[in-house]
Image (spheres, rainbow, N blue to C red):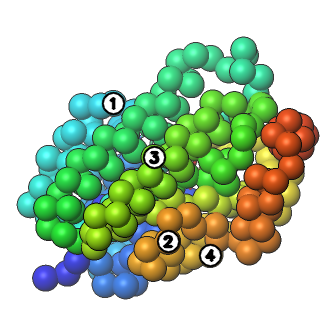
């Protein structure tokens, strides 16, 4: 029987490429997102897949997704669905931010817990939480809520990674922390990148390699890995000012 992976946010960008990468490695891939036509298009191209349409900003939908795949013996969970919004904190509509927190934080939290319980019971499985290099920074002026959601994902994932290590578990969990990736992220965030981006395909390959290697934090770009490590050395306020400048350049 083929091994099975569940990928959230598979209708576009990084999630779609991770689904393709897992398919090329012989996985049956369960694809989920809100846009069914996009998911079906991808499913037609993959060897063995299933489509589940789901709005992960709703807690009941996260629970339903877990229930629906109960019989599938999922051994890989990729929590990838997410989005950002660029703008001054006081100007971004509250409802957009609450939906962001529900999608980027609450859904990742719920699915990580439910699948980790299953994986620990079976003593096998991999969880890849798609955070961002934003999650390794002290904060992100003009994308304050987005950076905060990704800091949550990075912190949660790192702590669980250590818990699993302490317990000698065979279950692995990783946080993917890329810089700019060429996807639909910008059109949703109403932004443009001020620095060079990598392709979603390259990002997905490094992500899947890192996940199976059991890495805690996966930074696909070598230069960025250095920058994110160095970001912990200078005073916090200097990094915040530099990040604020970078974010201003993103204004469309
Ligand atoms: N692109 C970058 O520069 C970058 C860098 C670092 C991290 N990331 C992270 O990478 C992840 C993927 O983003 P991307 O860059 O690939 O952007 P993208 O092309 O816009 O893809 C986002 C995916 O998330 C899904 N999604 C959004 N809201 C959802 C909801 N409520 N329920 C279910 N699915 C939902 C979208 O599907 P539907 O719209 O069909 O629901 C889509 O498949 C995100 O977590 C993002 O924060 C991106």
Closer to the eye: label 4 or 3:
3
Secondary element under disc 2, as helix, strand or loop, is loop
- Residue at mark 4 to residue at mark 3: CA–CA distance: 25 Å
Q: Return the x and y of residue 23 as percentages of the image width and height.
A: 36, 78
- Residue at mark 3 to residue at mark 2: CA–CA distance: 15 Å
Of the image marks 2 and 4, the number of the one nearer the N terminus:
4
Secondary element under disc 3, as helix, strand or loop, is helix
Answer few, some or many: residues within 10 Å of disc 4's Cα (few below 14, many 20 plus, some between 14 and 19).
Answer: some
Q: Which residue lies furthest to the front in this view?
A: 166
Answer few, some or many: residues within 10 Å of disc 2's Cα (few below 14, many 20 plus, some between 14 and 19).
Answer: some
Of the image marks 3 and 1, the number of the one nearer the N terminus:
1
The C terminus sits in image quarter: top right
- The reply to whether residue 48 is visible in this rendering is no
Closer to the eye: label 3 or 1:
3
User: For this view, does 236 lie left or right of residue 67?
Assistant: right
Residue 156 is marked as 3
Residue 165 sits in quarter:
bottom left
Residue 58 is marked as 1
Q: Which residue is under mark 2? A: 215
User: For this view, does 126 lie left or right of residue 134?
Assistant: left
Of the image marks 3 and 2, the number of the one nearer the N terminus:
3
Q: Which of 160 and 222 is in front in this view?
A: 160
Residue 202 is marked as 4
Secondary element under disc 4, as helix, strand or loop, is helix
Circles 2 and 4 in contact, beta carbons < 8 Å: no
């Amino acid at each position: 029987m083929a091994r099975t992976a569940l990928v959230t946010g598979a209708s576009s960008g990084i999630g779609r490429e991770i689904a393709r990468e897992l398919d090329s490695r012989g996985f049956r891939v369960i694809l989920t997102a809100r846009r069914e036509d996009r998911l079906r298009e991808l499913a037609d191209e993959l060897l063995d897949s299933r489509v589940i349409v789901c709005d992960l900003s709703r807690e009941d939908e996260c629970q339903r997704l877990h229930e629906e795949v109960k019989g599938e013996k999922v051994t890989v969970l990729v929590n990838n669905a997410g989005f950002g919004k660029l703008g001054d904190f006081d100007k971004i509509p509250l409802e957009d931010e609450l939906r962001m927190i529900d999608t980027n934080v609450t859904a990742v939290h719920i699915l990580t817990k439910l699948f980790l319980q299953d994986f620990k019971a079976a003593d096998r499985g991999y969880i890849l939480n798609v955070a961002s290099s934003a999650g390794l920074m002290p904060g992100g002026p003009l994308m304050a809520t987005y950076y905060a959601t990704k800091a949550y994902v990075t912190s949660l994932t790192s702590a669980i990674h250590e818990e699993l290590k302490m317990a000698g578990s065979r279950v692995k969990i990783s946080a993917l922390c890329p810089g700019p990736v060429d996807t639909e992220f910008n059109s949703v965030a109403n932004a443009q990148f001020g620095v060079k981006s990598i392709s979603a395909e390259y990002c997905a390959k490094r992500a899947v390699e890192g996940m199976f290697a059991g890495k805690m934090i996966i930074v696909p770009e070598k230069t960025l890995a250095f920058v994110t490590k160095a970001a912990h050395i200078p005073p916090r306020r200097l990094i915040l000012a530099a990040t604020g400048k970078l974010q201003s350049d993103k204004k469309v």
